[in-house]
Image: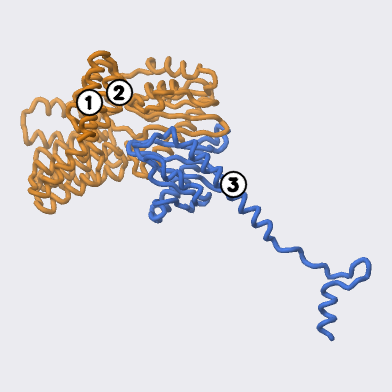
Chain colours: A orange, B blue
Amino acid sequence: MIQRFFTRSRLKQARRQLAEDFSAQNYERLIQQLAVVGEFDSASELCSEGLEQFPGNRGLLRLDARIRSHVREHRLVRLRQELEQGPRPALWTAYCELCCECAEWDEAERAAQRWFDDDGGAAALLLVARVRTQRFYGDRSRRLGEQAMLAIEQACEASGRGLEPLRLELRFMLAIGAFGRARDVVAELLDHQPGDAELEARYRALEGPAATAPEPRRALARVEESGRLATDRAETGALQSEDIRPALQRLAAAPGCGASVFLRGSTALIQGPRGATAQRTARGMKNALKAARTVSRRLDLGPLRELEIEGDFGQLVGEVGERDAALGWFRREVQPAERERLRDLSGAQPSTDDHREAA
Amino acid sequence: MQELEPLTRLFGVRFVALVTEDGVPIPVGASASRAGEADRLAAVSQQFLSELVQATAPLTWGPPQWARIASERGGLALLRVRGGALMLMYGPECDPSALKLPMQAAAQRVEKSLDRLGRCSSVEEPAPALPNTADSDGSPTVSDRVSDEARS
C-alpha cells in the first residue's frame, strides 16, 4: 500500500517535471515511472511522442526498444495461453508472426509444425514456409535458404500451386536474385490471373535479368557469401561512390588512421594506402570480414553487425549495415566518433548504448 | 577454473571457456555442462582466429590479440592468452565494450596461476643422479657403501 502510494507520487512528480521542463531527460523519467507501474501502452505512446520531439535521442530510443520488447513478450505469453485453451488459425498465425518479430525462430517453427501436425492443412504448411523464409531473410545462410525453398515447394504442392504460396515463392526468388525462376513463377501467377497488368509488367521486366541470373541454389550461395539479398542491392543501388569517397577520405585523413574501406559485394573503395598496398589492404580486410561473417553464421548468431580486431598493428573496426560494410584500420584506439562515422557509412543502426553516449 | 568464474557473472554472458591452441575447450561455470556444444564453439572460435591470422598476414600484421564480433542475436569475444584463447559468448542484451577489461583481468589471473603451477613443479623436480666415482679425498661413495654392506 505504502509502496504504491510512493510510486504514484513519483509518477505525479515526473509528470509535473515534464510539464515544467520540456526535455528528453524528463521524458525518460516519466516513461520509466510509467513502466514501473505497468502502464506499458502509455509508456510506448510517450516514447513515440518523445522521439517526435527529440528525434534520434539515444536514451529515448533505448527505452522505446525495451518497452516494445516487453510488450511483445507480454503478448506472446497471452497468445500462448489462448492457444492452449482453444487453438484457431488466426491465433497460430499471430503467434508465429510475433515469434518471428522477436527472432524466436525455433519457437515459431515448432508452433507452425504443431499446427500442421494437428490440422494437416495447406494453410499450416504455408505458415511453416513463411516462418522459414523469414528466418532465412534474418540469417541469410544457404542451409536455411534451402530449407525455406523446400517448405515453399511443399506448401505449393499442398495447395495445388495456389496463389498465396506462389506469391511467397516469387518474393523469395526475387530476394535471392534467382530471376529466371522468378519469371517462371510470374508466368504461373499469370495463369491464375490472366491479364493482370502488374504481373505482365513484372514478367517483361524480368526477361532481361533472367538471362544472366543464377539458378536458385547458386543464388543462395551468393547470398551466403555476400550476406546481402538482391533486394538490398536494389534498395541501395542509388548510392553512388561520390557520396562515399569524401566520408572515407575524412576518416583516412585522421591522424593514426591507416586505411578506410567501404565494401559492397565484391567491390571495394579504399582510402589511405596506394597502389598494390591498397589492393592488399582491401583484400585482407575483406577476408577478415568474410571470416567474421562465417563464424557468425556457424554460431547461429544471425547477420553480422560489428567486427573488432586488435593486435600489434593497432585496431581494425568494421560495421555492417544496410549499404554493406565499412572498415577502418587505426594504429591507435578508435574514437567513438569514428565508429559512428563507419556506422553511418555502412548504413547501420546508430548505437543506443549508454556507454557510447557517455563517451 | 575459478579464475574465470567472474566472467560468467557478467550481464548477458552466456558461455565462457578457455580454449587451447588445438581447440580443446575448458568450459567454466554453468556452461561446463554443455560439453558437446563447448567442443563445437571451441573449434569454430579457433578456426576464426586462424582465419584472421591468414587474412591479415599479407599485410605483415602480427596475430590478433583480441577479436570481437557482434551479430543480430549476440556475439563472440576472443582474447589470446598463453597457449590458447579465452572465449566468451554473449547475448544481444550485453554491453560488448565492457567485456575487454574483465577478460584481460581473467587472462592475467590464469597466467599467474599457471606461473604458480610452474614454480611448484620446479620444486618437485627429481634430484640429480648420485655420482658413482670416488670423491677426490678418497672417501667411499654411497654406491660403494651400499655394495660393501650387501657383501657383508
Q: Amino acid at mark 1?
A: Ser
- In the rendered structure, find residue A236 and report the number of the disc placed on it: 2
Q: Are marks 2 and 1 on the same chain?
A: yes
Report helix, strand or loop for mark 3: helix
Are the two marked residues, 3 and 1, in contact with CB atoms closer than 8 angstroms?
no
Mark 3 in CB contact with mark 2 (< 8 angstroms): no
In this rendering, the answer to whether B146 lies above or below B100 is: below
Instruction: Look at 25% across and 42% down and name the residue there.
Output: A104
Spatial distance from mark 3 to mark 1, Cα to Cα?
A: 53 Å
In which quadrant of the rendered view does residue A203 lie? top left
Instruction: From this view, report whether residue B146 is shown above or below residue A20.
Output: below
Q: Where is residue A201 shown, x and y percent of the image?
A: 14, 25
Q: Chain of mark 3?
A: B
Relative vertical location of residue B9 with respect to residue A66 in this rendering, above or below? below
Closer-to-camera residue (B105/A195):
B105
Residue in view at x 43 percent, y 20 percent: A337
Q: Amino acid at mark 3?
A: Lys
Q: Amino acid at mark 2?
A: Thr
Please say whether residue A323 is visible from this viewpoint.
no
- Name the element at disc 2: helix
Number of residue marks: 3
The label nearer to you, 3 versus 1, is: 1
**Element under disc 1:** helix
Q: Quadrant of residue A298?
A: top left
Write down the residue under mark 3. Answer: B112
Question: Pointer 1: residues within 10 angstroms few (<14), some, or many (20+)?
Answer: few
- The residue sitting at the right extreme is B137
Residue that extends furthest to the front in the rendered view of this protein: A2
